[in-house]
Amino acid sequence: MAPSSTTQKAAVNNFISITGAPEKTATRYLKNTGYKLNEAIDAYFQANPSSSGPSKDTQLGKLFDSLRDDEQDQKDTLGAESSMTYLASLGVDLEGASLFLALELVQAPTLGEITREGFVKGWKVQPGVDTQITSQKQHLQRLVAALDKDRDLFRRVYRYAFSVGREGDQRALSLDLSILYWEMLFKKPGMIWVGKSTGINWLNEWISFLREKWTRSVSKDMWNQTFEFALKSMEDESLGFWSEDSAWPGVIDEFVAWYRRKSEMDLDA
């Protein structure tokens, strides 16, 4: 009996694409598993061990092609619109830290572009993820849930935000973009930059300082060291870890001095 719904027909087409089996065979295996695609494919290859399905690279390449707009995108690139549509299908918050997490995973060169190479290589090495959008979405959701707990993961995503967020061939980020990205990263589901004891909102203090005192762009070193400073300031709200002899960038030294003067003025008021 032929598939009775659009969903079932799509499952048959996916089965054929992955296994190379005839439609009649695809329908039989899918019917036997209640149209559960992954179970049907596993059953097929167990029954036909000599069948060599397409490699994961090939399957990911086909998925990439299905995401492309033939009229707007180049052969090996998802343009801005296609990229955003794909990210939205994964449940990515385009105004939050999960945007940079997803872009780091597929090694996107810019905010508005995903390459075939980055897409295939990025997803190929993810454990327990097949070549279906639903599987990718579930995996990404697991990573998002770990962002505020896994410092190494968050550090990797944070650092990648600098690279992917630069405009053109610029080596630094503008101050306005840097502030925007800090606001995206230092909120849920990312790490919240507040003191753990008294709840000082360090992100607000940092941004206030920059808007008042800083007129230059943000270098890679300043970007990376801001994160390390953030980690320490969350634990030590007195900033006792800082000293004039430490190797913090000048902008951090200026911030500490600015914050301490401000705190003294607040106490005197």
Image (tube, rainbow, N blue to C red):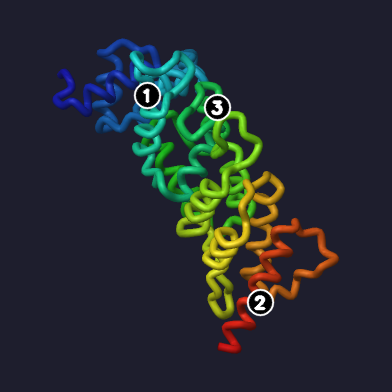
- For the point 64% across and 52% down, the residue is 152
Q: Residue furthest bottom?
A: 268
- Name the quadrant of the C terminus: bottom right
As shown in the figure, which amino acid type bears the numbered disc 3? Gly
Whether 105 is drawn above or below 22: the answer is below
Of the two numbered discs 3 and 2 in the rendering, the one whose residue sits closer to the viewer: 2
Quarter residue 4 falls in = top left
At mark 3, the secondary structure is: helix
As shown in the figure, which amino acid type bears the numbered disc 2? Arg
Separation (CA) of disc 3 from disc 2: 47 Å
Residue 105 vs residue 249: left or right?
left
Separation (CA) of disc 3 from disc 1: 14 Å
- Name the residue beneath numbered marker 1: 67
Image position, residue 193 (x, y; %): 55, 64
Q: What label does residue 261 carry, if any?
A: 2
Count of all numbered marks drawn on residues in the image: 3
- Name the residue beneath numbered marker 3: 118
Q: Earlier in the sequence, mark 1 or mark 2?
A: 1
Image position, residue 35 (x, y; %): 26, 30
